[in-house]
Amino acid sequence: MKGSTAREAGSGRTAASRGSAGAGRTSGSQRAPESAAASAWEWLKSIVIAVLLFLVIRTFLVQAFTIPSGSMENTLLIGDYLMANNAVYGAKVPGLGWRTPAFREPRHGDVVVFRPEYNDPVIDVVKRVVGEPGDTIEMKDRVVFRNGKALDEPYTDPDYLPDEPLPESGVGNYLWHLQALPAGVDRESYHPTRDSWGPLVVPEEHFLLLGDNRDQSLDSRYMGFIPRDVIRGKAMFIYFSVDQTANTPFPHFLTAARWSRIGDVIR
């Protein structure tokens, strides 16, 4: 009997041990899916936070742009990649039409990024502010006068084509000039050219923008004053540049890079 009792006791301990081990295995198998789910949730939260931070920075602080045309040569070249400050003029809140408070308004000499409605499809464009609200702007033989004073513009492209008249009809016609001419200017005899036009009075909440390459720039001379509401940011610096026409070996973005332009502040 004693032996039987001992064996039963031993058997009980063995069964208890097996039961305990089985319970341990069940608990571990439950924790594994929970651990995987927790890890996936952490990854998801990190991705969502990263995307939100990217959108906030891109919308309200800085944004990257590329230069697709030569209208701002030689300040900006085709293939330049620039960073623009979206906060300085007040950033628009997507979908709401609100604008955050501006640090200051665009002013003469600023190189700005804006989104005009005259492009189809609508794309961002970079030009220079030449006229602010209330300014009187005119150009005589390629020299720009602001409120009667000739501007010193060392940034303009010195190579130029022969002058040509602005079109009287179609896209980019000059008829809008007639409403902006000050009193006393004979509208009947007004026939502006690319290099000689005005004087034009800039209305409130609008700006007159020109490209630094005055020969090949679709700007305010053709398309009219630019509303303040579409001006998005101030160009800051070039963070990368590549000569897209260079015949260089792979990888082109490295072998054709204009390394000397990287970091140039846009003035």
Image (cartoon, rainbow, N blue to C red):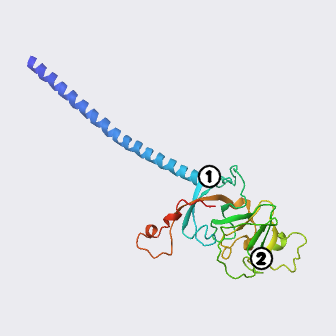
Depth check: 177 or 243 in front? Answer: 243
Under mark 1, the amino acid is: Phe
Spatial distance from mark 2 to mark 1, Cα to Cα?
A: 39 Å
In percent of width and height, residue 64 lies at 56, 60
Q: Which mark is residue 218?
A: none
Residue on which the image places disc 1: 60
Depth check: 2 or 201 in front? Answer: 201
- Quadrant location, the C terminus: bottom right
Answer left or right for 148 relative to 69: right
Q: Residue at x 53, y 64 (%)?
A: 261
Answer left or right for 80 relative to 216: left
In percent of width and height, residue 35 lies at 37, 41
Under mark 2, the amino acid is: Ser
Judged from the image, the secondary structure of the residue bearing numbered disc 2 is: loop
Judged from the image, the secondary structure of the residue bearing numbered disc 1 is: helix
Q: Quadrant of residue 92?
A: bottom right
Q: Residue at x 58, y 51 (%)?
A: 56
Whether label 2 touches label 1, CB < 8 Å? no
Does 163 appear above or below 154?
A: below
- Report whether residue 27 is seen: yes
Q: Residue at x 41, y 42 (%)?
A: 38
Depth check: 221 or 8 in front? Answer: 221
In percent of width and height, residue 218 lies at 68, 73
- Report whether residue 176 is seen: no
Of labels 2 and 1, the one closer to you: 2
Q: Quadrant of residue 226?
A: bottom right
Sort mark 1 into few (<14), some (14-19) or many (20+) by Cα contacts within 10 Å: many
In percent of width and height, residue 61 lies at 60, 52
Mark earlier in primary sequence (2, 1): 1
Residue on which the image places disc 2: 196
Answer left or right for 239 relative to 203: left
